[in-house]
Image (cartoon, rainbow, N blue to C red):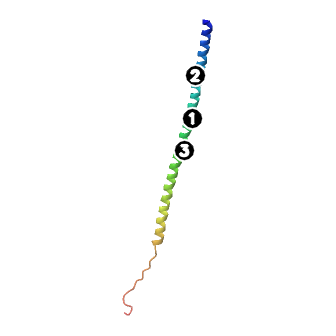
Amino acid sequence: MKTQAFRTLIVATAAVAALSVAACSKKTDEANTAAAEANTAAAAADSAQNAAATAANAAADASAAAGNAAVEAGNAVTSTTTTTTETTGNAAH
């Protein structure tokens, strides 16, 4: 009787241990999946940050080009050719 009870206890302990290992392994897999997803999200955020910086640089370049074009257009409007006429003395003499 004691032997049967001992065997049952050993089998029950082994079953609980197997369930514990299975439960921990599942959480480890979920944690690994979550970590991989976090790394993917971090890489995507880094790419988005680089794209935003590139867009900001392009906007600054476009703004500078627009400013230069405005200055050149202003210079084209204000530059005129003037002609001077010189008069010499009294024409009657």
Residue identifier under label 2: 20
Amino acid carrying label 1: it is Ala
Amino acid carrying label 2: it is Ser
- Of 25 and 72, nearer the camera is 25
Placement of the N terminus among the 4 image quadrants: top right
Residue identifier under label 1: 36
Whether label 2 touches label 1, CB < 8 Å: no
- Residue 27 percent location from the top left of the image: 57, 28
Position of 91 with respect to 28 (left or right) is left
- Of 7 and 33, nearer the camera is 7
Q: Relative to 33, does residue 48 appear above or below in the rendering?
A: below
Q: Relative to 19, does residue 88 appear above or below in the rendering?
A: below
Q: Secondary structure at mark 2?
A: helix
- Residue 6 percent location from the top left of the image: 60, 9
x 51%, y 46%: residue: 49
Q: Along the polypeptide, which appears first: circle 2 or circle 1?
A: 2
Amino acid carrying label 3: it is Ser
Question: Residues under labels 3 and 2: Cα distance?
Answer: 40 Å
Whether label 3 touches label 2, CB < 8 Å: no
Position of 45 with respect to 85 (left or right) is right
Nearest to viewer (mark 2 / mark 1)? 2
Tell me where residue 10 sits by quadrant: top right
Placement of the C terminus among the 4 image quadrants: bottom left
- Residue 23 percent location from the top left of the image: 58, 25
Q: Relative to 7, does residue 71 appear above or below in the rendering?
A: below
Q: Secondary structure at mark 1?
A: helix
Q: Along the polypeptide, which appears first: circle 3 or circle 2?
A: 2
